[in-house]
Amino acid sequence: MAGRTAPISITEPQRATHPFWTGAFRPLFLLAGLLAIVAVVWWVAGFVHGIATPSLGTGSWWHAHEMIFGFGGAAIGGFLLTAIANWTSRPPISGVMLMALTTSWLIGRLAIGFGEYLDPALTIVGALVYFIFLLALGVRELVAARNYRNMRVLAVISMIALFDGLFVAACLDVIALDPAMLYQTAILAIILLIGLIGGRVIPAFTRNWMQREQINAPMPSMFSRFDMVCLASIALGIVAVILDPAGVIAGSVLLFAGILHAIRLVRWRGVHSWREPIVIMLHLGYFWVPAGLVLLGVAILWPDVMSSRDALHALTGGAMACMVLAIAGRAALGHTGRELRAGWALNSAFGLIWVSTVLRVMVGFAGSGYVTILAIATLMWIGGWLAFLMGYAPVLLGPSQKKTRGIPVR
């Protein structure tokens, strides 16, 4: 009689030579924090002191690209591949494959940094290689696990990658599109991704904490049709901005989207989690989604009241950066076996970045104090990311303390 076939078991991958390469959140969150400082300090040094800076047509376009697609792209990759391992119950991307992905991100920084000296086609390809690699890994993992539900996340990231290529091409005069319109739509696409992910993790983490602490209050509303309407409002805003960036329809849609997301945030019951920093900072970070959408709508409808540049910083410095800090800090602790408690580094980093965003948004109303307020906001931004790196570089570079925990949201 033929012997039985031995069952196939899925085990953790062979340990890499260094803990740094055992999970995508380690190199990508660390690089995101480093670029958040470099892309700001270098650009400010060039703007104020005339120091030579990389140029993507202009130094400002280089700065915008690196903060949106470089910083944002690294953070997206760190979260995506960490979450996919939990969604699929497959081993996380690690070792040589993770090294190759990280290298592709670094290639993108070099391609954009030397964009004015390279053939435009090489610059565009160099900028996109990381997103293409990331999406390929994501598709491979989800298809292997037959987890097609989360393909919607990859669809939004594909949209962000498309805007990346178009933005670089427009900055290099390869296509006749307005770079300002493209980076606005790219920011809104990232906000759509934050809305999709945040709508799953924020109420789930809040509910878990409230149940553990036995909070006697209504529980957060989980993902429902209302949340789908909220996400659709951002998607509609992207279309409106593409068709008529300075039009009444675009401004009105963004205002409406902001109101919907404010209601959504209230439904998550964050007010009850004020005693737990690592939970409340998720709500405070998401606050900038409705605030930024409303402010951008106001800037489009009434440009004399607020500039779109100031309003967009509510979405970038606020929603993007604060949500990156809140999720990266939590993931770094949870996936290295540490207690989910926000220490001095994460609390300081989040507080500095949050207040920096307030100052940056309000700088347009500062009058003669514009430069002073802008300088304070910039210093707080740099200080916030330095605090993150000081506190979390040892966590991201060092070994796990015990068996890691996944992200409990499917």
Image: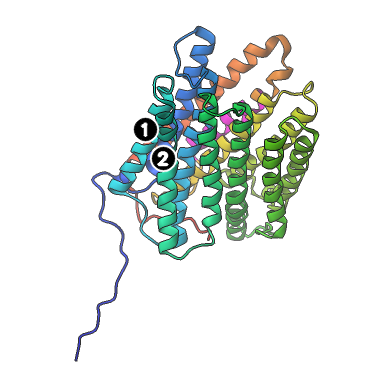
Q: What crowding class fits label 2: few (fewer than 14 Cα within 10 Å), some (14-19), or many (20 or more)?
A: many
Q: What crowding class fits label 1: few (fewer than 14 Cα within 10 Å), some (14-19), or many (20 or more)?
A: some
Left or right: residue 400 compared with residue 321: left
Circle 1/circle 2 CB separation < 8 Å: yes
Left or right: residue 67 compared with residue 356: left
Horizontal and vertical percent position of residue 119: 40, 25
From the image, tell me which residue sits under label 2.
Answer: 130
Amino acid at dot 2: Tyr
Horizontal and vertical percent position of residue 394: 36, 37
Horizontal and vertical percent position of residue 233: 72, 47
Callout 1: helix, strand or loop? Answer: helix
For the residues labelled 1 and 2, the Cα–Cα distance comes to: 8 Å
Residue 23 seen by the camera: yes
Residue 399 seen by the camera: no
Amino acid at dot 1: Ile
Residue shown at the point (45%, 44%) measured from the top left: 77
Is 395 magenta? The answer is no
Which of the two labelled residues, at mark 1 and mark 2, occupies the earlier sequence position? 1
Numbered label tally: 2
Residue shown at the point (62%, 27%) measured from the top left: 178
Q: Which mark is residue 289?
A: none
Find residue 194 and report its image quarter: top right
In this view, the residue in front, 328 or 114, is 114
From the image, tell me which residue sits under label 1.
Answer: 107
For this orientation, the residue located farthest to the bottom is 1
Query: Residue 273, relative to residue 48: is it above or below?
Result: below
Query: Residue 303, relative to residue 280: is it above or below?
Result: above
Residue shown at the point (52%, 46%) measured from the top left: 158
Horizontal and vertical percent position of residue 287: 67, 40
Q: The N terminus is located in which quarter?
A: bottom left
Tell me which segment is drawn in magenta.
343-359
Report the coloring of the rendering: rainbow
